[in-house]
Amino acid sequence: MLTKKLPHVLLTLLIGILVGCGSTNPLADEAQSNIESQNFEEALAAAEKSIEQNPQDPLGYYYKGVALGEMAGAEEDPEARAETYKEMNAAFAEAKEVAETAEDVPGEVERIDAVKNVLWQTEHNRAVELATDDSLKQAVSNPLEQSMYHLKNATNIQPDSLLSWDVLSQVAAMNQSFEEAANAKEKFISMAQDTSLEANDYLQLASYHFQLDNQQEVVNSLEKAHEQFPDNQEIVSNLADAYQRVGEPEKAISTVEKLVEQEPENPQYHLVLGTQIYQQALTITDSLSANSNEIVKLRQDLNNSSDSEKQDIQQQIENLQQENQQLQSKIDELTDRAEEELNTVLEYRPNDDAAYNTLGIIYQNKAKALFDQRNQTTDNQKAAELDKQGQKFLKEAMNNYERAAEIDPNNQEYWKSLFSIYTALGMDEKAQEAMKKAGMQ
C-alpha cells in the first residue's frame, strides 16, 4: 500500500531549531536534538523525562507533542495513527496550560497551532487525493476507506475543521458508509454558523438518514432545513414525502399548502400538492381494500357458522361496511382535490408529463374501484352500469398516459402503464407497440 508520510522537513522548520541555541532545560534540548535527527522514540523519552523532572516547563510537553506527531506520520497505516494524534493533542494542550502560569513563555509554544496545521493539511490533502485521483485510487487498496482514515486523523488533529468534517461526510457516503456520513454531516452542521450553511447540507444529511432507513431523522433534518430555507422547493417537497413515510399525511399536505398560498401561480407547488393529496388517498385506499378483503372472509365464515355465531359475524360485516363508506367518502374528497391541483398545473404548464401521468393513475384506480364493485354485485343491471363507468375511466386514463408519453416518449414507465390500459381495453395492436417501447420484449 502506498502511504505518503508526513513532511518532516517542513515540520522541522516549524519547530524552529536553531543550531547552537539551547534552553535551560537539557532534557528539552535533548528532545529537540533527537527530533532534528529523526530519532523520535528517543525524543519522546527525553520529553517525558523533562516532564517528570520539570513539570512546570512547557517545553517538555511541547516536544512530546512534536515527537508524537512525527511518530504518527511514520505509521504506514493511517488507521493506526489515530491514538497517537490524540496523545499529541493532549501533550500540546498541557504545554499551553503550563505556559499560562510560566514567567517566560517559550517561543515554541506559539508554534503549536502551526505544527498542528501542517499535520492537518497533510492528512486532509492525502484524503482528497485518494478520493479524487483516479490513478492513485487504482494503485491503493480500498482508497475510499483509506481516505476516510486520513480524514478522521485530520479531524482528530483539528476537531474544529469544518472542511474536514464536510469532506469526511461526502467520502463516507461515496464508500456507502452512511452512518459515518450522517455523523460527520451532523457534526459539520452543528459547528457551522447558520449563515454559512446551504440547503444542500441539510438535503445531504437527510439523504444519508434515508439510506439508513432512519425516517424520523429524515424528517428532523428536513424540518431544520425548512426553518433555515422556508422557500426552498426541494426541501419542502422532500419534507412532504418524509411526512408521508412516517404516517403524517396531514403535515405533508399542509407543508405544501403554505407554499401554494405564497405562490398560487407556481405550477410546481400545485404538482407537489396534488401528488401529496393523492398519496394520502392511496393510503386510505389500502385500508379500504383490507376491510373489503376481511368482509369477503367474514361472508365465507358466515356460511359455515352456527346460528349463535351468525349475528356476531353479520355485525362485524356491517361495521366494516360502514367504515368503508366513510373511507370511500374521504378517498373521493381527496381524489377530487388532487385532480383539481393537477389540472391547475396543466393550466400553467400544459406540457407537464408528470401531471398527466398522475391523472392517468387516478383514473386507472377509479376504474379499478368500479370493476371491483362490479365483480362483487349480483345485480346484472348494476354490474353493467359499473362496467360502463369503469370503461369510461380507463379511456380517461389512456388519454392522460398517452399525453405523458407524447411529451416524454423515452419514459418506459408511461409505456408500461399504457400497455396495461391497452390490454384491458382489448387494443392488442397498441398493446404490442407499448410493450416494445416499455422494454418488456
Image: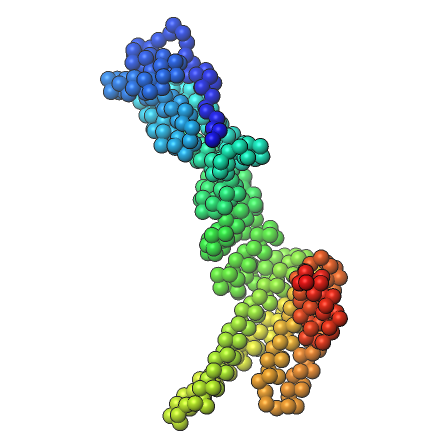
Q: What residue is drawn where x is 38% and y is 21%? A: 66
Report whether 370 appears left or right of 45. Answer: right
Q: Is residue 161 above or below residue 204?
A: above
Q: Is residue 85 above or below residue 294?
A: above
Looking at this view, name the residue that lies furthest to the front. 441
Nearer the observer, 287 or 269: 287
Nearer the observer, 138 or 354: 138
Q: Would you identify the image quadrant in which residue 344 lies?
A: bottom right
Looking at this view, name the residue that lies furthest to the left. 53
Q: What residue is drawn where x is 42% and y is 28%? A: 76
Q: What residue is drawn where x is 46% and y is 33%? A: 150
Looking at the image, can residue 301 be seen?
Answer: yes
Q: Position of residue 144 (x, y in %)?
A: 50, 38
Report whether 198 appears left or right of 312. Answer: right
Nearer the observer, 247 or 194: 247
Image coloring type: rainbow
Looking at the image, can residue 265 be seen?
Answer: no
How many numbered markers are drawn? 0
Q: Is residue 249 above or below residue 333?
A: above
Q: Position of residue 357 (x, y in %)?
A: 68, 64
Report whether 365 appears left or right of 326. Answer: right
Looking at this view, name the residue that lies furthest to the bottom. 307
Q: What residue is drawn where x is 67% and y is 86%? A: 385
Report whether 47 appears left or right of 301. Answer: left
Q: Position of residue 1 (x, y in %)?
A: 47, 31
Q: Quadrant of the C terminus?
A: bottom right
